[in-house]
Amino acid sequence: MKSRRKGKKQAISALLAAALALALAGCSPDAGDDVVTLSFLQFKGEARQQFDTIIDEFEAANPDIRVVQNQVADADTTIRTLLVKDRAPDVMTLNANGGFGRLATAGVFHDFTGDPVLETTNPAVQEILADLGNKQGEVNSLGYVNNANGIIYNTEIFEQQGLEIPETWEELFTVCEKLQAAGITPFYGTLADSWTVLPSFNAIGAYAAQDGFFDKMRAAGREVGPDSAVSFQKDFDEVLQRQAELFAYAQDGYRGKTYDDGNAAFARGEVAMYMQGIWALAPIQAINPDIEAAIFPYPALSDVPEDRLLVTGVDVTVTIAKDTPHLEEALRFVHFLFEEDVIAEFAASQNMVPSVIGAELSDDPALQSVAPYFDDGRIAGFIDHQVPSSIPLDTTVQQALFTGDVPSALATLDNEWRKVAARTIQGD
């Protein structure tokens, strides 16, 4: 039943993408006068109104350009369909995930090398995009707004208990012990939803993945295993062990609780901490607008406070189709998007961190708590974006947290990596 539902969903997505391709085919040509029409694809339903406002302001200042916004939820499927039909939108925003990186590597996007906007964007954000993929020697997208992944904590509980932000693993476990002694549950676990194991895996795993771990994994390919230079079995044992230690401080019955359960419980002040990213704050605040929360990064595996990194995803990246017939107009629109006041207002509307250096940050305490890491370039990307989507990363980690059998989980990940390498690397 599950595979049939998935097949039906994929079929519906393909039909919707095809329908959008036809819609774009009807709206992207010029209006027939001196006005150039740009097709603009974006994937965030919650950002449609904000983009409408931006487009209105841009068109008022640029009366020779009309921008048509097309919002789709499944942008990854849609953009592939449009590319196949040679109907790529002129300008597009996409989530910077592994699929986006593979498209960029294929050379379907504009090269922004030398564009003055690059001088204004956070180089650490651009480095995350480069890690995902660019066509060799090119810069194929511009980071727009970024999320933050760490440990969300109830600042009121911390203040009431006299707790400081922990900077080492020992300090974090001490905080947990003090909370338990005060009758407060340290963490809310939500293992019923497999994807919810990934925020903490990404955050702790980012330390193990420094120094080109995934480049070395790709180079090792079919040889990945306990005896290769790098592997999950050699380098990620401590990552899963640390995750398991944190879940040991979660509430009873955490194996059967969902993401929605976790948001509701944190909003009600039932726990002090939550292993989620900043995206969880909106549904939490929808339940309790008065909740006081902020975020701190996980301690480094080295346990050196100065080594701590904040894991962030480039939630929205902006790019232009390589073969757009309206490059000059598309660049004018992109440059408008990256004006400080424009990007600052957009980022605030989405509770995100803008990529433009100097753009004003929302006064939300949670965003303010992560700002120094962006300012100092102490950020790292989501490592699950480096793992091929055919590898069951979330369910494998979830199973390890269910059973405590870390060695089997890591062996599974290495085995799945070898399978992918065997399918994708030219054989000898």
Image: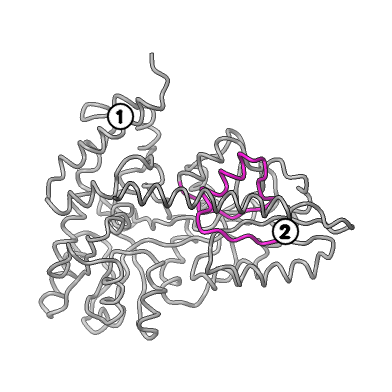
Residue 98 in the image: state x and y as whole percent: 45, 44
- For mark 2, give the secondary structure: helix
Q: How dense is the environment of label 2, judged by Cα within 10 Å: few (below 14), some, or many (20 and up)?
A: many
What's the distance in space between the residues labelled 1 and 2, CA to CA?
44 Å
Residue type at tag 2:
Phe
Closer to the camera, 365 or 321? Answer: 321
Closer to the camera, 118 or 107? Answer: 107
Residue projecting furthest to the top: 428
Give the residue at x 56% y 43%: 80
Q: Which region of the structure is painted magenta?
A: 68-97
Location of mark 2 (residue): 333
Residue 157 in the image: state x and y as whole percent: 25, 81
Location of mark 1 (residue): 418
Checking the image for residue 92, the label placed there is none
Write down the quadrant of residue 257 in the picture. Answer: bottom left
- For mark 1, give the secondary structure: helix
Colour option used: one colour
The image shows residue 426, relative to residue 385, as above or below, that is: above
Q: In the picture provided, is 207 more to the left or to the right than 56? A: left
The image shows residue 349, relative to residue 28, as above or below, that is: below
Q: In the picture provided, is 174 more to the left or to the right than 381? A: left
Give the residue at x 41% y 27%: 424
Residue 400 among those drawn in magenta: no
Residue type at tag 1:
Arg
